[in-house]
Image (cartoon, rainbow, N blue to C red):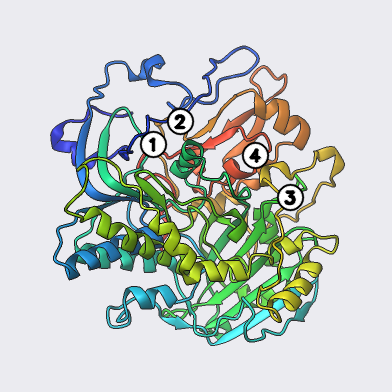
Amino acid sequence: KRVPIDKCTSQRCIRALKTVKADHAPPQLYTWRWKCSSAVTPRITSHYTICPRDKDPRWEGVEMERFADEADVVIVGGGPAGLSAAIRLKQLANEQEKDLRVCLVEKASQIGAHTLSGACLEPSALNELFSDWKERGAPLNTPVTEDVFSLLTKKYRIPVPMLPGLPMNNHGNYIVRLGHFVRWLGEQAEELGVEIYPGYAAAEDVFERGMELHAKVTLFGEGCHGHLAKQLYRQFNLRENCEPQTYAIGLKEVWLIDEKKWRPGRVEHSVGWPLNRNTYGGSFLYHLNEGEPLVALGFVVGLDYTNPYLSPFREFQRWKHHPFIAKTLEGGNRIAYGARALNEGGYQCLPKVTFPGGMLIGCSPGFMNVPKIKGTHTAMKSGMLAAEAIFPKVTAKDLASETAGLHVPEYEDNLKKSWIWKELYSVRNIRPSFHNYFGLYGGMVYTGVFYWILRGKEPWTLKHAGLDSAQLRPAKECTAIEYPKPDGKLSFDLLSSVALSGTNHEGDQPPHLTLKDDSVPVANNLAIYDGPEQRFCPAGVYEYVPLETGEGMRLQINAQNCVHCKTCDIKDPSQNINWVVPEGSGGPAYNGM
């Protein structure tokens, strides 16, 4: 429940963000009608995006007066991209002795608490941002010392040579806990004078009530499949000239293992089992060097898979039983779990990234290099390029208006001239090359011939399969997958896993997992696809349970379990689920994931 907002608490109540746009009417962001419950379809969704506040008795008597604050630049999202942009802006301002107010809002309770990645960091952008990052104490404690790549069968491992120049070669990179790295970036930003507001969710790019932040330019760095970015794509038609984005889900655990098995700096990747050749995915296992024998391991599954019975979480648990993996984990203890979605579309799926009043940075538009399984360096560089394009505009003395939003197309021009564009273009065909009869094996051959030999200079660009949500086949056309029961030693059940993520949401808020039509899950998803949301969600949010009458089923949404991966919004075959931000500070509480 929201309480009245007064001026004394306005700074602590950043519920929304307003980008002032030049010559643009406020967008109509939500057009779906809220349907009241009926005897046939129980009401599931009560969020204000579906049930308008003026028609919801829960909002009666609540003070909705607005308060506003002004900044030169507002940044939504405290990840690598947003923080790098903030840092670069203040570096430029301090160098040129300019007064520049930069505000950054982050929905997590603290910087880094929602950050999850492998992560093997390529330090190219960091070197540009801080040439003295070692002296500043950046938590890059584990240089890569060993690179291992494997093709797994059910019982055996086939070693794959890691040749120089292949995307997966990690010479010169560092194994990091990205949440700790992001927290360090936040400290550097604050030292430079950036105002950081953690624990506040930016809910709409134009909002009618609550706290507003007005800025000449707003940078949207929400991460993969951001809630605001979805609205901006529609409002400004930013995806008009690109392919639909394609995604994967990445699941991760951190283990404390037997010290005798610990090999700090060792990087392991694999493809193959337990996935079939036509399901894109793979694994990682990284040995950290942080004073105790820790390993970070994870499993990635492309969300263009076709079998609705597939469970990415249970594939991950099954993978840990492979003899090559199990030998590292046996006798160890799992101490952390989490999941997030990844952009996998690459070059073909990049949208227009500038519009009046703002721009998209980082994993929001999708700068991840999929064959490398790396996006932190490109996210950071995009934020830096955005800052360098913005700075002369927002500090110009001849601004036509102090309040009108600025359009900065130079950012997109600079992107296309940068090493980000060159890097993504060179690997553009690797991910879509897996869409062939031979699947994984055809893709590996393509990579070896056309990337390793030609370095991505082939005169064609392959296309992806289309929207991930359109790839599922009806359940009657697919074979159910029988997964082994977890043994509690290497593999675990879903709910005990979610407990390790520290996830929490206030119980009295409207569920942030909204449905455009409450009748669709049973009528379509359950009837045709056997309820795939029960399996693609890595947190046990969705389950079908019997109606209280005993006749039929209903969808139950356990929103308090949500780890904010947004897979449901992406993979739902009906495109009926709309993930929106919950109250600030809600969600996982990752510690160095």
- For the residues marked 2 and 4, what is the alpha-carbon distance in whole angstroms? 20 Å
* Secondary structure of the residue carrying numbered label 2: loop
Does residue 304 lie above or below 48 as drawn?
below
Residue at 62 percent of width and 12 percent of height: 39
Task: Return the disc, 4 or 3, that comes first in the chain's sequence.
Answer: 3
Residue assigned mark 1: 204
Name the spot of residue 41 as percent of width and height, x first: 63, 18
> Residue extending furthest top?
39
- For the residues marked 2 and 3, what is the alpha-carbon distance in whole angstroms? 33 Å
Residue at 51 percent of width and 19 percent of height: 34
The amino acid beneath tag 3 is Leu
The amino acid beneath tag 4 is Asp
* Secondary structure of the residue carrying numbered label 1: loop
Q: Foreground: 79 or 254?
A: 79
Can I make out residue 379 in this image? no
Crowd rating for badge 2 (residues with CA inside 10 Å; few <14, some 14–19, many 20+): some
Residue assigned mark 3: 310
Which image quadrant: the N terminus? Answer: top left
Q: Which mark is residue 29?
A: 2
Left or right position of 29 against 160: left
Does residue 7 lie above or below 421 as drawn?
above
